[in-house]
Image: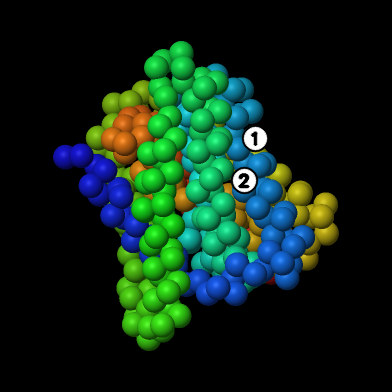
Amino acid sequence: MNSIFIVLPILTLLMFDLGLTLRPQDFVMIVKRPRAMFVGLFGQLVLLPLLAWGIAMAFGLQPLFVIGVMLIACCPGGSSSNVFSMLARGDVALSVSLTAASSIITLFTVPLVMQWTTLSVGSSIGVQLPVGNLLLQNVLTMLLPIVLGIVMRMFMANAAAKIERVLSKIAFPALMLLAGIFFVQHRETISEHFAVLGLCVGALLIVAVVAAGALAKVTRLDTAERRTIVIEVGMQNAAQAIAVASSPFIFNDGRIAIPAIIYALLMNVVLLTYVGVIKYRK
């Protein structure tokens, strides 16, 4: 069974669900609160990929796994970050706006970062990035579902609310199902490299969370904003990374998705621990 027939529908549904939670006003936050938005977007779009590259090089990963680590690092924030921000008593409005903005901006930044990555480490193993295919897939599976969700909320608010309640309940199980399918399909490769990849991805998550918190503190954001920045930088859209890695139109190699699968599992552990520490200190 080709997993892409499961990956793309799940990603599309997740993006449609995200669109149902958004309003046009959410995109205006970058003007109303430029400092918090800039810090969050810088952390997601610049800091995390830089950390990912440095840590992947430090662990001496194989080129395919370097590409996979960079792919998950340059994807947008995950939609579940809004729930985590609420649990951590963060700034939920900021979280929603950051997720929305990063989902649109990464339509253009992911091809740039991944083109550089594949040219740097992929050429030696014959891996190339069809940039046009990546842009087209992202538009069809991310941009259009988000826009449709926003439009539906604007003109069919009651129906949108009912659909969103259903989709929000299946979003996390769907992502775990996706991770489970890939674990089964690539169990031998995962078991062979899990130790080094688990350590690498775990290190990336912990360093990213600490660095995001430090960045937010240095820029004098308030406590709620700092907590949201930490969560937004740590929580990535693993479904998109898996879709790009496994798509027959782009990389067509499930091994590139393995770092994203491990990241999807560990990010929930790390961020739930972060939320637990906050509640314990309260």
Instruction: Identify the residue at image location x=41%, y=82%.
Output: 155
66 with respect to 256 (left or right): right
Amino acid type of the residue that numbered disc 2 sits on in the rendered structure: Leu
Q: Is residue 59 above or below residue 26?
A: above
Rendered-image quadrant of the N terminus = top left
Q: Is residue 45 above or below residue 154?
A: above
**Secondary structure category for the residue under label 2:** helix
Give the residue furthest to the left: 1
Give the mark nearer the N terminus: 1 vs 2. Answer: 2
Q: Answer few, some or many: residues within 10 Å of disc 2's Cα (few below 14, many 20 plus, some between 14 and 19).
A: many
Instruction: Identify the residue at image location x=60%, y=67%.
Output: 27
80 with respect to 33 (left or right): left
The picture places residue 261, in percent across and down from the top left corner, at: 40, 41
2 with respect to 47 (left or right): left
Closer to the camera, 172 or 252?
Answer: 252
Instruction: Identify the residue at image location x=52%, y=22%.
Output: 119
Could one spot residue 49 in this view of the protein? yes
Amino acid type of the residue that numbered disc 1 sits on in the rendered structure: Leu
Closer to the camera, 269 or 90?
Answer: 90
Residue on which disc 2 sits: 45
**In the rendering, which numbered label is found on residue 50?**
1
**Mark 1 vs mark 2, CA separation in Å:** 9 Å
Place residue 245 in its image quadrant. top left
The picture places residue 268, in percent across and down from the top left corner, at: 49, 52
Q: Are marks 1 and 2 in contact (CB under 8 Å)?
A: no
